[in-house]
Amino acid sequence: MSCTIVVGAQWGDEGKGKIIDILASDADIIVRYQGGNNAGHTVVIGDNEFILHLIPSGILHKGKTCIIGNGVVIDPDALLKEIEMLRKKGVKVDGNLLISEAAHVILPYHKVIDKRRGAEIGTTGRGIGPCYVDKMARCGIRMADLVNEDSLRRKLQANLQDSAEFDCEAIYKQYLEYGKKMKKYLANVPIVLSKAMAKKKRILFEGAQGTLLDVDHGTYPYVTSSNATAGGALTGTGVGPTAINKVIGVVKAYTTRVGEGPFPTQFKDELMEKIRSKGKEFGATTGRPRRCGWFDAIIVRHAVIVNGLSEIVVTKLDVLDETENIKVCTGYKYKGKTYKDFPADIDVLSGCEPVYEDHKGWMSDTTSVKKYKDLPKNAKAYLNRLSELLDVKIGMVSVGSKRRQAFKTK
Ligand code: IMP
């Protein structure tokens, strides 16, 4: 039995889509466990670029089963459009996609509330937070409700009884229609997974967003509303901790962040533009320019700890190919004190001065390197130092967006 969780170890957008796509070739089942269509996983196959928001990237491989777990919040309209987009590009979505009956549904009022209240956090405006609020407040609507007319009507009426803004009947009819279209995908996911594990199937759990956006372990309140960390893979699918063999963290060779919130190592100079354009650092979901900065070993070490990472994958190393002097943050200075561990107090992160160590760049093109040993000396020294600071091994390095531009370190 092999169950592997893949998580983002920074603020999301680490390149998980590509890594899941590579790892999916050795898996039988790929499961998304949290978040919703706030995520955007980009996978490049040949000349084709796919941006997936809800469906696991494994769908691009033939013969795999893809599952959306109960921890995911689903906008039916977005999901149906994504299925249609895949079909148009020749990807089969029939019998290979299962959706948890217990996953919560994003409704029109969630999106309106998110757009109204999410600006301070810089949310994606997709209704994610308000949908999770209803889940926790126990007034959410789940996928199973979309195929149960009485339950859907009762719950919508209860939620909208004081609202003059939303037409309850119209929403009821629209979501019942969605239910009809999605019924064939609905499944009892814990049962499906336990049977698969009994048959020794290989299962890959695909995290969305990243550790620093996790509602418990991230830069709260500037986070998303779900558990993007490894624990979310358990509650978000219905498997127990004893099933998990490996947890892989994906990190960029530098750092990016979209939306609001503290980012100690953010570039203050022309590097912002240079790295943003070389790394194509624009949100896959909203198109917003990402903020860019140096690698922050404090936040990634935090990710190693809270996820129990077995190894990390370093992506986008090539983006630093033309950077002469590279910095790595190894601590934060705040009010005369130096922090070596990730602080829960957001004021420390917002007001701190990063402590940096300097590294010599390699100033050569790594995009066609195929073996770890062939990387430039300074690039290897940089990676070795990251591994040392994080106290975790680097299992794979990625040097471009194509499938072939990645290699194992051993
Ligand atoms: P929400 O998830 O839309 O509620 O947004 C909350 C925060 O998470 C905002 O700062 C978003 O920019 C950020 N966020 C949500 N999804 C992603 C993602 O997939 N990548 C990077 N940031 C994200």
Image (cartoon, rainbow, N blue to C red):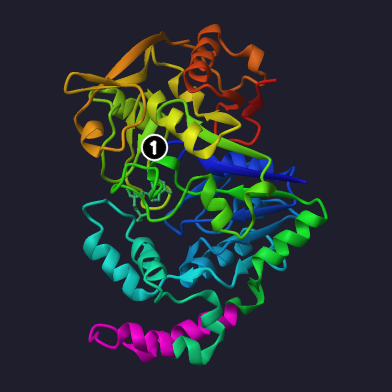
Q: In the figure, 354 relative to 186: above or below? A: above
Q: Is residue 160 magenta?
A: yes
Image coordinates for residue 247, horizontal then vertical, percent: 60, 38
Give the residue at x 55% y 19%: 366
Q: Is residue 174 magenta?
A: yes
**Farthest residue, direction left:** 335
Q: Is mark 1 within 8 Å of ligand 1?
A: no
Give the residue at x 31% y 38%: 344
Image coordinates for residue 129, horizontal then vertical, percent: 35, 61
- Where, by quadrant of the figure, is residue 55 drawn? bottom right
Does residue 242 appear to the left or right of 212 in the view shown?
right
Using the rendered image of the protein, determine whether residue 357 is visible from the camera's viewpoint.
yes
Image coordinates for residue 334, horizontal then vertical, percent: 20, 24
Does residue 224 appear to the left or right of 28 in the view shown?
left
161 vs 268, nearest the viewer:
161
Using the rendered image of the protein, determine whether residue 12 is visible from the camera's viewpoint.
no
What main secondary structure does the magenta stretch of the protein show? helix
**Element type at mark 1:** loop
- Where, by quadrant of the figure, is residue 258 drawn? top left
- Bounds of the magenta segment: 154-181
Q: Quadrant of the C terminus?
A: top right
170 vs 287, nearest the viewer:
170
Q: In the figure, 87 relative to 276: above or below? A: below
- Where, by quadrant of the figure, is residue 127 drawn? bottom left
Give the residue at x 31% y 54%: 123
Q: In the figure, 155 relative to 383: above or below? A: below
Q: In the figure, 293 relative to 72: above or below? A: above
Q: Which residue is mark 1?
A: 281
Image coordinates for residue 323, horizontal then vertical, percent: 39, 15
Give the residue at x 26% y 32%: 349
**Farthest residue, direction right:** 199
Q: Amino acid at mark 1?
A: Glu
